[in-house]
Image (cartoon, rainbow, N blue to C red):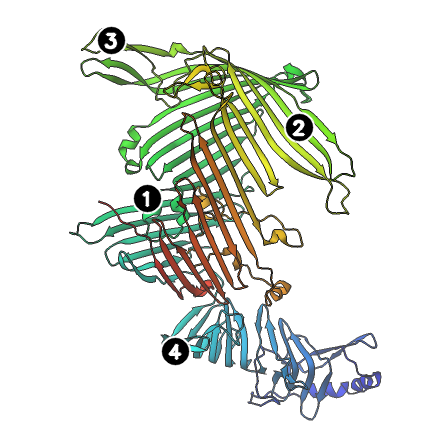
Amino acid sequence: MQTNIPKILFCCILLLFPLVCSYAQEIPKTNSIEIRAEKDSLILVNNLPLAKLVREQDSLLGLFETDTLKENNQNQVITDIVDYSAKDYMRLSQREGKMYLYNNAEVVYQDMTISAGKIIIDNNQKEVYAYGIVDSTGTYTQPPVFKQGSRTVEPDSIRFNFDTERALIYNSRTQEASFNVKGAVTKRENDSVYFMKNVRFTTSEDVDDPEYYFYARKIKFVPSKKIVSGFVNMYIADVPTPLLLPFGYFPLTEETTSGFIVPSFGNGNRGFFLQNGGYYFAISDYVDLLTLGDYYTNGSYGLRIESNYAKRYKFRGNLRFRFEKQYTSERGFPDYGEGSIYNLQWSHSQDSKASPSSRFSASVNLGSSNYYTFSQNQTNSANVLNNTLRSSVSYSKTFDSDPGVNLSLTASHQQNTNTGKITMTLPTLQASVDRIYPFATKSGIKKGIIQNINLQYNLRAQNKFETTDSLFFKPQMFKEAVYGAQHTIPLATNFKIFKYFSVSANTNYEENWVFETYDRSYDSVNDREVVDTIRGFDSYRTYNFGASIGTTIYGQKNFGKDKKIQAIRHTMRPSISYGINPSFDQYYDEYYEVPLADPTDSTRVEYSRFQNTLYGAPGKDFSSSLGFSISNTLEAKVRDKDSTATEPKKIKLLNNFSVSTSYNLAADSLKLAPLSVRGSLPIIQNKLDINFGGNLDIYALDNNNRRIDKLNISNGGSLFRLTNANVSFGYSFSSKDFADKDNENEDEIDNESYRNGGRRDDLLGVNPGLNGNLYPDDEEEIEGDEKEKTDWYNYRIPWDIRISYTMTYNNRVRNNEISSHSIMFSGDVELSPKWKAGVSSGFDFVNTGFTYTQFRFQRDLESWRMSFNWIPFSARKSWNFFIGIKSSVLSDIKYDKRRAPDRTISN
C-alpha cells in the first residue's frame, strides 16, 4: 500500500499487527445475511475472500513490507494472495470486524480486480461491499468497477458473500459481444449465470442515454453466450414502440453460429414480396454457407447460395450462385411473359506461402447476359452499365530445372451482355522454357553479339468455343469447337556499336497445328461457294526477321540557380527498325466462279485451307518495311517554394511525346503508313495529365473515300490529313489537397463492379448493399483526439470530386465528326459530421443528354444508419430508402423501401 501517513503512525500500525493475526485466526464461518452499506445501493464483486497477505508500500520510507495473517488449516477460507490499496487511508476496526479502504480503493484477487471510492470487508458476515463516494459538490464519484479477465462491470455498488459466492448488483453496466447491458438489480448465482431485473440492452455506446434499447423486466444473462428474456419491448428515444415480444433470445457468442435470416417485406411490379430470407450455416471455422430466397405474389421466386472459405496460409475464396424465375403480369394477359436468369461468381486466391512453385487462382463471373438488367434483387447499377463478363481459372507450375520450365493450364470466358456472344477456351495449355544463352561464359557475364544470342521455346494449345447465351454449354456449342497448337522459337541478340547505339536483332520461327481444315469450291448450279470440312492433322510454318537500332540524346539549357526556372532538360529517344515478313503463298489455292448464265464472266478466287482455323491463315503478301519512331520528354528544374529545401524540384512539361510511322519497301503503292502521334501533357503534377493521340495520313482519298497513291497536298489538301484523334484525362481532388498538411494518396475503391470488369471509382454510382451503407469507409470508428475534433464542427467541410473526360474525333472517310464526347463526374460532401451527400453523373455532348445519374444521401444516427439513393431518369429510374441498426447482430431490424426499375420480360 502506498500511503502518506507519518512514520510514527506507521509504527503504531506495526504494533497492532499481532492483534490482527489473532483476530484473523478466530473468524467464525457464518451464513451470509443481508446488510445495508452506508450508501443507498450495493453491487456485485466476484468471488473475493479475506486477505491472506497484506502488501504495504510506503512511498516516504521507500520500504516494501509483507504482513502474513496466519490461520489454522481447518478454518482457512482463502486460496490466494489478496492485494489491496487506497489513496487516503486503510482502517482496520477490530471491534466491528471490518476493514475500510477509502478513496481510489482497489482490491486484487487472482484475475479479479475491484476499484471503487470506498470498499468495506466485513469479516464477521464474510461479505465485501464496494461503492462510490460523494464529493464536495454532492456528485456521486468513483463508482465501483469490477474486472475479471476481459469482462468489465460498472455498477453503482456491490455486495458479495464469500461462502455462497453470490452477489447483488445495483445499476450494473457491462458489455457483452455487441451489446451494452444495464440492469437495475442483478443477482449473481455463479460465474456463468446472472439474473437481472428491469434491464435495458442496446448496441448504442451510451447505455445510460441510448438512441434505442430493448427493455425487459426479467432476464437470464449467461456471459459470452446468450440473453434470455421474458416480455421484451423496444424503445426508441425512450418512447415504447409496437415491437413487442412475449420472450426474447439474443445470442452473445462472438463465434460464428448458424441461424435464420429474417426476410425484407415490400411490394413492386411483381406484387408483394419477401426478399433475402433464409438460413446461415456456420459449417466450421474454414467454410460457411448462406442460403437466401425471394418470393413474389405473382409466382416469381429467386434463390441465392453464397459460401466463403479460407485456410490460413493456404487459400481463401468465395462462391456465389443466383437464380431467378420471373413472371410478368398474369397468364392469359397479352403482356404476360416468363423467363429464367442466373449468375455464377467464384473467386479463389492462393497464399504465396502455400506453394512457391505452383499456384491456383480463379475469378469467374458468368451467367445470363440480361441478369443484371432484369434481376429483381440486385441494386448495383454499375454492373448493368458494364457490358462484358469475364472469367478465368488457372493453374501454373514452375519446375526447378536448368533451364527453368513453366507450365500453365487456363480456362477463360468472355461474354458480351449486349449481343449475347460468348468466347470460351476450355482449356488453354501454355508451356515455356526459360531463355538459353548457349554462348555465354560460365561466369554469366554476356558481352557482344555472340554471347548475347538467346533462344526460347513456347507452346500454346487451345480448345476454343464461340457460341451465344442461349447455346451455352449445350451440345451444339461443343460441336463447333476449334482447337490447335502453336509452337514458337524466338532467337535474339543485342549489342552496342559506337558506344552509344543499342542494336537488337531477332528472328522468330512459328509452327501451327490444326485438326480441321476447309476446302472451298464453287457450285455453279446453285451459284454459291461450297465449304468442305476436312478432319485430320495439318500444319503450316512461318518465320520472320527483324532488327532495330536506337539511342538516347540529352539536351539541357541552364538559366542559373537564382532563377525560378533553373534549367530545362530535353530527353529524346530515336529508333529505326527493319522487318521482313516472307510470303507463304504455298499454303494458298484457288478456284474460279463460273456462272451458268455467262461462262465467260469467270472470277478467280484465292483461298487458304487454314482460313477460319484457330490461328488463321499465314500471310500471303511479302513485306519489307522500315519503322521510324522518336520519343520526347521535357523536364524543368524549378526553385522549391520551401525555403528549407536544398535541391530544386523536378517537374515534367511534356511526357512521352512520340511520333512513329513505317515505310513498306515491298509495296507497289501506299508505302508510307499514317503518322501516329501520342503524348501526355502534365497540368498538375501527379494529379492531372491530359492524354492525347492522333493519326495523320499523307495520302488522299478518291471519290469513294478509298486511299489512293497520291499525296493529299497534291490533291488540293493539306500536307497531312487528320484521320482520327482522341483526348482524355481523369482528375480527382478533395478538401485534403488544400489542407495545411500533406495528404497521402488514397487507395482506389475496390468494389463488385470492378471485380466484374467495371471501374474502380464511383463514376457509375455506388451500390448501397443490403445494409444500406453508401460509404463503407465510415465503418471505421474514430477514437481519441480525432473523435473529439468532430464534436465541434468548423468551416472546413470535407469534400471530394472525381472527373473523367474523353473526346474522339473521326475523319477516316471524310466523315469529319466527333464520334464520342462526354464528361463524367462524381462527388461527395460531408455537410456535417453526421450528414453526407453525393452525386454521380455525366453529360454526353454528342447525344446531348445526361448520362447515368445517381444522387445519394446518408445520415449517421449513432447506432442507426439512414440512407436514400435516387436514380432520377433513364431505364434504371428508381429510388431506395433505408433505415436500420448498424450492428450486424440486429441487422434484421430495419425498414427498406424501394422503387425498383421496370423490368419487363418479353415472350
Residue at 45% x, 76% y is 220
Residue at numbered disc 4: 231
Residue 646 placement, left or right of 815: right
Secondary structure under the numbered disc 2 in the rendered image: strand
Q: Which of marks 3 and 1 is in front?
A: 3
In which quarter of the view is residue 501 placed?
top right
Query: Callout 4: 10 Å neighbours few (<14), some, many (20+)?
Result: some
Secondary structure under the numbered disc 1 in the rendered image: loop
Residue farthest to the bottom, as pictured: 95
Residue farthest to the top, as pictured: 600
Q: Residue 370 carries which label?
A: 1
In which quarter of the view is residue 113 placed?
bottom right
Residue 741 lies, with reference to residue 695, above or below; the image says: below
Query: Callout 1: 10 Å neighbours few (<14), some, many (20+)?
Result: some
Q: Give how far apart the Cα atoms at labels 3 and 4 are.
A: 98 Å
In which quarter of the view is residue 239 placed?
bottom left
Secondary structure under the numbered disc 3 in the rendered image: loop
Q: Which mark is residue 571?
A: 2
Circle nearer the N terminus (3, 4): 4
Circle nearer the N terminus (3, 1): 1
Q: Give how far apart the Cα atoms at labels 1 and 2 are.
A: 51 Å
Q: Nearer the viewer, mark 1 or mark 4?
A: 1
